[in-house]
Image: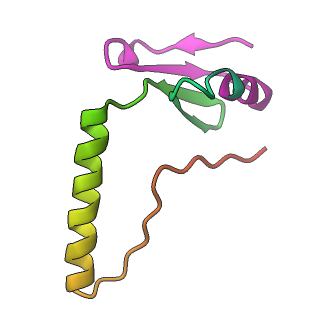
Amino acid sequence: MVAAISKAGLGTGAAFLSNVTWETLEKLDADFAQTGAHLTYLDGCLEIMAPFSEEHEESRNTLDQLLEIYMRTKDIRFYGRGSTTLGMK
């Protein structure tokens, strides 16, 4: 595998890799499984993000609940998706 690391992610808690094969992604996913890191993959490009902090999760959860209450009150159709990772060979 030839991987290029983008400097855009330096200092942000994220790393960006290109030319990552599906097989390499599967190996990295297994390696990072217990770390809480978030992997996002599309067309050979991989972003690895550090786990979110408790403060982030609490704020996100509160915002999710407020938006859901608002949409239900206004009878707005919505679909909660959470954090989804999709991939295809």
Looking at the image, is 16 positioned above or below residue 58? above
Residue 6 in the image: x percent, y percent? 46, 15
Residues rendered magenta in the picture: 1-29
Q: Camera-side residue: 65 or 14?
A: 65
Q: Specify whether 51 is left or right of 36.
A: left
Q: What residue is drawn where x is 22% and y is 45%?
A: 59
Q: What residue is drawn where x is 63% and y is 49%?
A: 86
Residue 74 in the image: x percent, y percent? 20, 85
The answer to which image quadrant residue 14 occupies is: top left
Looking at the image, is 47 positioned above or below residue 9? below
- Figure disc tally: 0
Q: Specify whether 21 is left or right of 54.
A: right
Residue located farthest toward the bottom when viewing the structure as drawn: 75
Q: What residue is drawn where x is 37% and y is 19%?
A: 13
Q: Camera-side residue: 88 or 27?
A: 27
The answer to which image quadrant residue 56 occupies is: top left
Report the quarter where the N terminus lies.
top right
Q: What residue is drawn where x is 68% and y is 46%?
A: 87
Judge whether residue 23 is colored magenta: yes
Q: How is the image coloured?
A: rainbow
Q: Camera-side residue: 89 or 34?
A: 34
Judge whether residue 12 is colored magenta: yes
The answer to which image quadrant residue 26 occupies is: top right
Report the quarter where the C terminus lies.
top right
Residue 9 in the image: x percent, y percent? 39, 18
